[in-house]
Amino acid sequence: MKYDYILVGAGLYSAVCAQKLHEAGKKVLVIEKRNHIAGNIYTERIDGIDVHKYGAHIFHTNDIEVWNYIRQFGEFNRYTNTVVAFYKGEMYSLPFNMYTFNKLWGVITPWEAKKKLEEETKDYKDVEPSNLEEQAIKLVGKTIYERLIKGYTEKQWGRACTDLPAFIIKRLPLRLTYDNNYFNAAFQGIPFDGYTALIEKMLDGVEVMLNTDYFDNKEHFDEIAEKIIFTGPIDRFYEYKYGELEYRSVRFETETLDTDNYQGNAVVNYTDKAYPYTRIIEHKWFNPSEKALKESKGKTIISKEYSSTWTVSEEPYYPVNDKKNEELYKKYLELSAIDDKVIFGGRLGQYKYYDMDKVISEALALSKRLIID
């Protein structure tokens, strides 16, 4: 065997595993079908602006071990995610907080907001929700649902809320405070030099092959590796033996504009169905340092995000974790349990939507087990 481990994919999960295994003296190779490392957290600097090519990624965690680990490879800014939602010409604060309630109902105190929420949800108090619409109204009431949830969710999933399972919205954050911080996390930020530079440092000393599709030469890679850590779609690995798992995909329209400020915020969600995109990202506000703003030279870069139906030729983003797909995934999981050559990890390998801190946590745990073994 030439390598102890070949890692398929050069995203965050693989980078953590590769870094820890390399540090422990293991012979490691990372292969990536794209022409760049960092997977979907890839950032590219254009006109002094770090562009999040595959959508916004804001690092946030309450896990001090994960936070200390990731900061070894880059300094993070103090970016705080403060999302606003656009609905029919009006702007609302997200997550739902006292600013939201004041805009909707004119309430000022938490007591007034609580009473209004109770009034909005009273008709659904004893309802066992059968779909997402009923679940949302039971949690936050019809006004918030109609203005800030319904349109966005139906664009995101490509179907009516009445046709979506209730579990997709198990809970919705309601804050009876004037707090616009989207993530309730102790640690939050974005690397000053972008995520690509972060991953480059993690992979320092590790052999990496770009523009290399594992499936084009699978037998060869399997032969030269003791183990394969696979971070692609698990159903693709087994040649869709039981059928395709479902995902939602995302299409991005990115533009450079001759203005220094397009929308005044990094993220604006469009909950009005009159707009086909789900949100607009203005990349410069993720890292608005004096140096970065000077380098942007009066320009800004925006990306409009369009949720779309996934096909095997497109990038899978969001697993559709409904009952049908979970049952199908279990079949592939059973196949992997008897396969002692390959280990599946990450969002696609484990068919779960992971935040970045969870990706790191899972990869650190796997690496520890492999090093001990």
Image: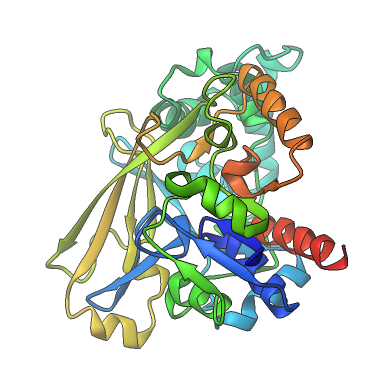
- Residue 348 as seen in the image, left or right of residue 340: left
Query: Residue placed at 60% from the left, 51% from the top?
Result: 222
Query: Residue placed at 22% from the left, 76% from the top?
Result: 47
Is 221 located above or below residue 348 in the figure?
below
Foreground pick, 283 / 263: 283
- Residue 296 as seen in the image, left or right of residue 204: left
Foreground pick, 161 / 180: 161
**Image colouring:** rainbow
Is 271 located above or below residue 65 in the figure?
above
Residue 50: x and y in percent read 35, 71
Location of the C terminus (image quadrant): bottom right
Tally of marks: 0
Location of the N terminus (image quadrant): bottom right
Q: Examine the image and state in which quarter residue 70 appears.
A: bottom right
Given the current orientation, which residue lies at the most extreme left position?
258
Residue 14: x and y in percent read 60, 61
- Residue 358 as seen in the image, left or right of residue 162: right
Residue 168: x and y in percent read 61, 28
Foreground pick, 5 / 304: 5
Asked whether residue 291 is in view, the answer is yes
Q: Examine the image and state in which quarter residue 329 appears.
A: top right
- Residue 112 as seen in the image, left or right of residue 157: right
Q: Examine the image and state in which quarter residue 30 appears.
A: bottom right
Foreground pick, 86 / 45: 45
Is 135 located above or below residue 291 in the figure?
above
Query: Residue placed at 18% from the left, 71% from the top?
Result: 299
Asked whether residue 356 is in view, the answer is no
Residue 330: x and y in percent read 72, 26
